[in-house]
Amino acid sequence: MENFDLETLMAELAFDTPVVYHNYTDYWGSNQTLADELWDSIDTSPLVVALGDDWAKKHNLPLSIFRFPWDPSAKGVYYLKAFHGLHCLKSMRKAYIEYERGLTPTIHAGHFHHCIDALRQDVLCYADDTPMPMHDFPNKVGNNQIRTCRNFDRLIEWTREPERHACYHRWSDYKGMPKNKLEMFAFCDKDSEYHPLMKAYFEKFGHKPLYGADDHFRSS
């Protein structure tokens, strides 16, 4: 296998950030209202980045078939694995609590199984070798253990840098693929080189409901 240096490590994030592992957090505590709010508040919008074709080739990436709508000749749209994993976790939790609470399922079974397998592959890929001290109760394994991680905030910052910001906002992790996909790319910053083109497009054609005629478009 080819040895990659930092020039090929996409966001160039090193494992240099100590993080304490907790076996009990509010994300699964007895306060289900709080847990729901915390999970739903996880923003997976940094999932999508717009990468130049030259940059992609330099980093041994296949060119993306889905093109960046405001510069399709030069940039493709890519999903970042970390945020895809968060999206999958949110969707799987949603499916489980709907089952647990006797609600009508909103997560398609195929999506659920896709996410399970995607996370399986991620666990094998990361091969986290942090030793977790044993306790007298299974859910306490590894509590308060310090592990070395990449800096997640720096990854978010990397996605928002002008050369790769995709003007993207993810309205929902639960509703599936929008009918009017361009609405998800309607969030260029005012100082973005793509803001004038984006603004002119929507001024000419107007905004459309994200998920179809019955969906109320929310502006931001």
Image (tube, rainbow, N blue to C red):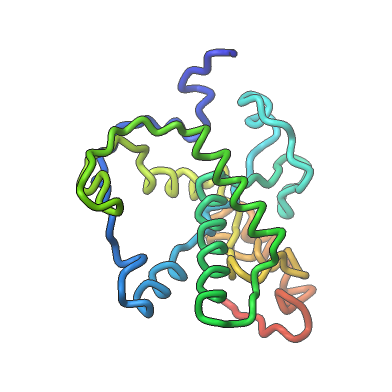
Seen at 22% across and 39% down, the residue is 133
Q: Nearer the viewer, residue 77 or 148?
A: 148
Q: Is residue 27 left or right of residue 21?
A: right
Q: Is residue 55 visible?
A: yes
* Residue closest to the far top: 2
Q: x%, y% of residue 101? A: 51, 80
Q: Nearer the viewer, residue 87 or 153?
A: 87
Count of marks overlaid on the render: 0
* Residue closest to the far front: 136
Seen at 66% across and 37% down, the residue is 52
Q: Is residue 191 visible?
A: no
Q: Nearer the viewer, residue 106 or 208?
A: 106
Q: Give the position of the N terminus as an image quadrant.
A: top right
Q: Nearer the viewer, residue 202 or 8?
A: 8
Q: x%, y% of residue 48? A: 60, 51
The quarter of the picture where residue 139 lies is: bottom left
Seen at 62% across and 60% down, the residue is 195
Seen at 66% across and 54% down, the residue is 113
Q: Determine whether 124 is above or below 187 in the image.
A: above
The quarter of the picture where residue 127 lies is: top left
The quarter of the picture where residue 39 lies is: bottom left
Q: x%, y% of residue 37? A: 40, 74
Q: Determine whether 73 is above or below 171 in the image.
A: above
Q: Is residue 63 left or right of residue 164?
A: right
Q: Give the position of the C terminus as an image quadrant.
A: bottom right
Q: x%, y% of residue 67? A: 75, 47
